[in-house]
Image: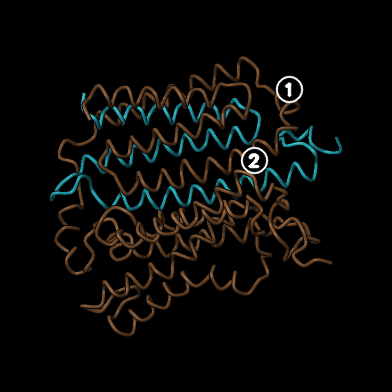
Chain colours: A cyan, B brown
Amino acid sequence: MTTTTIFGFCAAVLVGLGLYGLIVNPQPLRKLLAFNLMGNGVFLICAVIARRGAAAGMGGDPVPQALLITAIVVAFAASALAVALMLRLSEETGACSLSSTRGEGD
Amino acid sequence: MSIATHISLALLLLGLAFWTIVVRDTFSAVAGFIPYGLLLTSAWLALAAIDVALTEAAIGAGLTGALLIAAASRLHKTEIAARAEQRGTITRILAAILATTMTAAIMACILRLPDRAPTLAPTVARHLAQTGVGNPITAVLLSFRAMDTLLEAIVLLVGLIAIWSLAPDRAWGGRPGQAQTEDPKGPLAYLARVLPPIGIVIAIYIFWVGADHPGGKFQGATILAAMWLLVMMSGLSDAPAIDRGWLRFLLIVGPAAFIAVGFLGVVVAGAFLSYPTGFAKLLIVLIEAALLPSLAVTLALLLAGPPRRPGRRA
């Protein structure tokens, strides 16, 4: 078993865990957390692919690594927007829920 | 690091990830997310992605952790109602089957990755000298794939506009967050006096060294943002009202300089964002220096959220 296979498998499980949490957890914040796990899994696969492309004295292919930096920053911006939406929803309705039967007037 | 260390690292990482999904209390889940982010940083190191590790530690674990902790504590009162919406057993089983299938499919793909992995590393190495920078990641971010980085800076700005647009009408143009009532002699205020000078030096060092070694504007900007947030949280200085001219200027100076250099490329070198021979390093440093304050302010304000109280005292 090589390092890339270990972290490749780790990434696969992260995506699975994230997908499960995204479906099962009802709270939007928990869904965001799960979605971040899924994203991390995808990033980790990208890093594994970069590591496998190590050549020319570099520890990994710098192109996917640079894209990963971009991805992490954009993921943070998206999470911040999601959190702002949740907080606004809870300010307006007193609840934070995706259910259509709850959240209005209670 | 040996294989055994890597396996333990991966298992710990998955253990924490599992915890954040299954634990009942949202605050505990978020609390697990922060050490998880730090372990993920070690995973990037194990995969020889040092620049990514720095970004993950600063943004993935640091800023995202702070964002989620703040959200979890403010949403705490909605927890009990939300828990009542727990999904039924059948949904859980179906979700577990779906997630397991997904994991198995990805694992199969990982095992079937081609043995002679495709790579752009030799191409980057061949053209690195033309850019004048020594860090291949910086060369990719600001020369070979500069368009991606420009669009990223603009995405951050659009994200901030989207967050600001969630402000209620009465608070538009005001200050984000709650007014802080921290004790001006308390430990947080003490830290906010002692840490920023050191933090600013480290941030500028990481930014400057990024041309030739791991580091760069994103990591430096995050540290600057963290220092500013610390000062704001300690109550030593209030968050700025979002209609301030200097604030708007700092937000757009980075992307604007980037676009200006891009059009300069059209005139001088014949293509958008291409640098004239011999001036690549100068222009890269110029763009990075303009992006640093923009990114720092944008990241801090993304975390601070929409304006919630009037900016000027009535």
* Side of B279 relative to B129 (left or right): right
* Side of B270 relative to B65 (left or right): left
* Side of B100 relative to B124 (left or right): right
Task: Give the residue drawn at x 25%, y 77%.
Answer: B279
Q: Position of residue B199 (x, y in %)?
A: 45, 54
On the image, numbered disc 1 is attached to which residue? B84
Tag 2: amino acid: Ala
Circle on res. A104: none
Task: Give the residue drawn at x 81%, y 61%.
Answer: B170
Give whichever of discs 1 and 2 has the lower sequence position: 2
Q: Nearer the viewer, residue B23 or B177?
A: B177
Q: Nearer the viewer, residue A85 or B105?
A: A85
Q: Position of residue A86 (x, y in %)?
A: 68, 43
Q: Secondary structure at mark 2?
A: helix
Question: Furthest residue to the right?
Answer: A105
Looking at the figure, which quarter contains the N terminus of chain B?
Answer: top left
Q: Are marks 1 and 2 on the same chain?
A: yes
Q: Position of residue B137 (x, y in %)?
A: 28, 55
Find the distance from the CA under tag 1 to the CA under tag 2: 20 Å
Tell me the chain of label 1. B
Please identify the quarter of the rendering in which residue B6 is found: top left
On the image, numbered disc 2 is attached to which residue? B71
Task: Give the residue drawn at x 55%, y 54%.
Answer: B193
Tag 1: amino acid: Ala
Looking at the figure, which quarter contains the C terminus of chain B?
Answer: bottom right
Task: Give the residue drawn at x 44%, y 36%.
Answer: B37
